Amino acid sequence: KQEVTQIPAALSVPEGENLVLNCSFTDSAIYNLQWFRQDPGKGLTSLLLIQSSQREQTSGRLNASLDKSSGRSTLYIAASQPGDSATYLCAVISDYKLSFGAGTTVTVRA
Amino acid sequence: GAGVSQTPSNKVTEKGKYVELRCDPISGHTALYWYRQSLGQGPEFLIYFQGTGAADDSGLPNDRFFAVRPEGSVSTLKIQRTERGDSAVYLCASSLEGQTEAFFGQGTRLTVV
């Protein structure tokens, strides 16, 4: 069974600092990996999808890397803003199923 | 539609009652998924539909849970004899056939009292 772990569970940074969120998974036989954002009481918003053949994916201030062999992905958020405060979830995709980590809750202090 | 729509957004029910949660996927998406998210946890897989049929229902916790998608579009998750432990956010997602990127709805927060 795929196990996904996200460290740290919570993170608080001052505005402007870069964020580094880590995700690890136990089974490297994955199709893709997807990063989501979840605001309190809301659903999941897709941020980035990394194909298994890719090493990284970028969108604006967000950059996600994938190292399948070591079972790791990292989400970088540059120049954090208070609006980045949310829970960030990574999900590994095997076949059609997503296996999620518990998330990292980020607070960006103004 | 523009996105995945779930209704109701909130549902409070008494222990032992029956509930139905509805999901309207993005138009043209043949794959539909239900997940359940408990407080402080990531979503957990419940069931996957490809078209009208449930291709994988291995995540349904017991036989009180059932889901249908009779016309290959809207899906209903049905929970019989609800228990307090069923309280969670139920999330629905859809994707295009052959694509793995999933798009999620806002969820239904179910509270069993």
Image (cartoon, coloured by chain):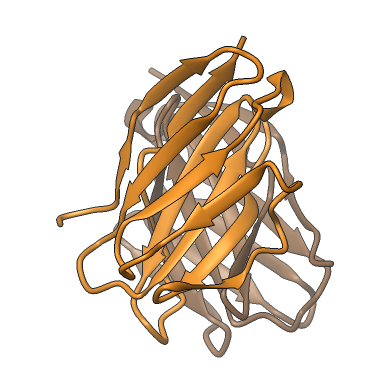
User: Residue A37 lies in what quarter of the image?
Assistant: top left
Residue A49 percent across, percent down from the top left: 45, 70
Residue A32 percent across, percent down from the top left: 56, 77
Instruction: Work out which quarter of the rendered image holds the N terminus of chain A and state it.
Output: bottom right
Q: Which chain is orange?
A: B
The structure residue drawn at horizontal position 34% and vertical position 77%, both measured from the top left corner, is B96
Taking the image as drawn, is residue A23 in sight?
yes
Above or below for B52 versus B105? below
Above or below for A25 versus B7? below
Instruction: Work out which quarter of the rendered image holds the C terminus of chain A and state it.
Output: top left
Q: State the residue lying farthest toward the left.
A: B1
Task: Pick whichever, B83 or B85, lies toward us.
Answer: B83
Above or below for A16 versus B56? above
Residue B107 percent across, percent down from the top left: 42, 37
Task: Pick whichever, A42 or A55, lies toward us.
Answer: A42
Residue A80 percent across, percent down from the top left: 40, 37
Q: Is residue B3 left or right of residue B99?
A: left
Taking the image as drawn, is residue A20 in sight?
no
Q: Is residue B21 left or right of residue A73?
A: left
The structure residue drawn at horizontal position 34% and vertical position 54%, both measured from the top left corner, is A61
Figure colour of chain A: brown
